[in-house]
Image (spheres, helix red, strand yellow):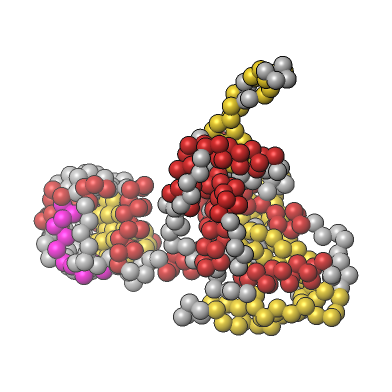
Amino acid sequence: MYNIPPKKLIIVNILKILNEHSDSEHPLKQKDIQEYLEKEYSMNVGRKAVKRNLMSLMDFGFENIECKTTPKYQLNEETGEYEDCSIYSDFYMQHTFENNELKMLIDSIIFSNHIPKSFRDDLIKKLEGLSNKYFKNSTSNIEVLNSVTSQNYQWFMVIEDINEAINNTQQISFTYNRYNADKEMEPECEVTVCPYKMVAANGHYYLICTEDRFDGFSPYRIDRITDLKRLDAHFAPIQTFNLKEYLDSHPYMGTGKAVTVRMKIDEEIIGEVIDAFGDDFKIVSDRFPNYGKLEIEIKSNINDMFSWALQFGDYVEILEPQSLRDRMRETVETMHKKYYRTNDDRVQKSKMIAERKGYLDLSRVDLTKNLIDFKALNIKEIMLCDNNISDYSFVGDIDGLESIRIRGKVDNFDFLKNIKTLKLLMLKDTGFRDLSIIKNLPIKTLYLNEECDENTDVLYDMKDLKWLRITRNIADLIDTERLKKANPKLKIALIRRGKELRLWEDI
């Protein structure tokens, strides 16, 4: 190691101090530099020596050292001329990158999932070294939550090899990997391709290439490529490849050729369309202005459009091609089945419908496991079927009910007496027998798939009744002529085999 005299190191240490401790917002006076020299390098240096070395640095061509200059001229009595004796202060280093530029570069690395974490940390430290201590302090609090970075430590070498192969029009072969259930990468297939472009999309780097087994271009995630080899075989470059057109039609880097997709969207997501597919699409029609809808045509591959349309399913309807529309429908139906399997699923679905339409369908909902605030729903109609309970007294506490449908055993029907707004009552296999319970209710439609008692006099007094659907057992107990005379507009139908309805006149 060279034995450098301490005085020779003064100028080097001053340069380090300027680089580490100064910028345009934190200039240093000569006294500050003296203090840093003593504190960090154990050098006791006079102010004139500090100034002399600072001037030397500036004379040596360090144009990035700035300072404040106060002009001053002094008469030289020997020469009789005025000499420049300007005062220099507030020295600082003008760094190659502004702090906001460095922050932008560091942010791009922090949020790059394709760079392994150890490499990412090293790059950030190197970039931080291009500024001063104040910038380092400003980046120490940046952290990425739930960050998942690549496990591929060959990534930088892969990038370099692909770049060389593209420049030399060389074919390459590599292992393409996938993640297994242990969250580790494992080989998926061996691939030989002709590389054309590398692009950054969706937080990842992709290789755009062609291969013999597929038509058109294929995208591969570069962070999942390992064991890459440049081959002796060469290929002819494609002169007509339009990268922008390819990226616009493959926002998620799916495979497949671009086709014309026609869809109807809510106008409010037009920005999301542009973000995904660019602005080169056609607005076919705005014939839905009152509903804020647009009909548009976009060039996209089917797989990418399918993924995007699912993401914005509430705002998008695929119109063409029919194959994509069919795929959307089948997927949505499959998802619907998955998310309405449990008892809680059925309850939530019923509540959502009730909030919009005032109709609460609790068919096949186990009411022994769920408590529902019926009053909060403001419902007018309720359907109860296969609920694993026989106590339906809570129905009588629902204000404003106009329609009740119940199937299954009911212990006590007294709750019906209190529902003075009831217009439709449908009972099936409930054990209902006493018609007197509904005597004073304004029912217009009565459906009774039951075995009632012989006393059917109540029916003759129900003047609001417009439709009566009953079993043969009840029909045999009714004096038809008397009923028609008491209520001439009443229509009577016979329930047969539980479902089929036939008008009384046809029996």
Residue, x 47% and y 80% (percent of image)? 181
- Image quadrant holding the N terminus, namely bottom right
Task: Please say whether residue 291 is one of the residues in the magenta stretch.
Answer: no
Q: Is residue 221 left or right of residue 39?
A: right
When the figure is inspected, residue 228 is found, relative to residue 272, above or below; the finding is below
Most foreground residue, 502 or 334:
334
Q: Is residue 387 left or right of residue 121?
A: left
Whether residue 210 can be seen here? yes
Magenta span: predominant SS is loop
When the figure is inspected, residue 204 is found, relative to residue 152, above or below; the finding is above
Q: Position of residue 346 (x, y in %)?
A: 33, 63
Q: Number of labelled discs?
A: 0
Task: Please say whether residue 392 is one of the residues in the magenta stretch.
Answer: yes
Residue 243 occupies quadrant: bottom right
Q: Is residue 200 left or right of residue 89?
A: right
Residue, x 55% and y 79% (percent of image)? 185
- Image quadrant holding the C terminus, namely bottom left
Residue, x 64% and y 19% (percent of image)? 74
Q: Position of residue 329 (x, y in %)?
A: 55, 63
Q: Position of residue 349 (x, y in %)?
A: 35, 58
Q: Position of residue 276 (x, y in %)?
A: 62, 52
Residue 84 occupies quadrant: top right
Whether residue 306 can be seen here? no
Magenta stretch, residue numbers:
386-396
Most foreground residue, 200 or 324:
200
Residue, x 45% and y 43% (percent of image)? 35
Instruction: Residue at the far front: name it.
Output: 78
Most foreground residue, 302 or 440:
302
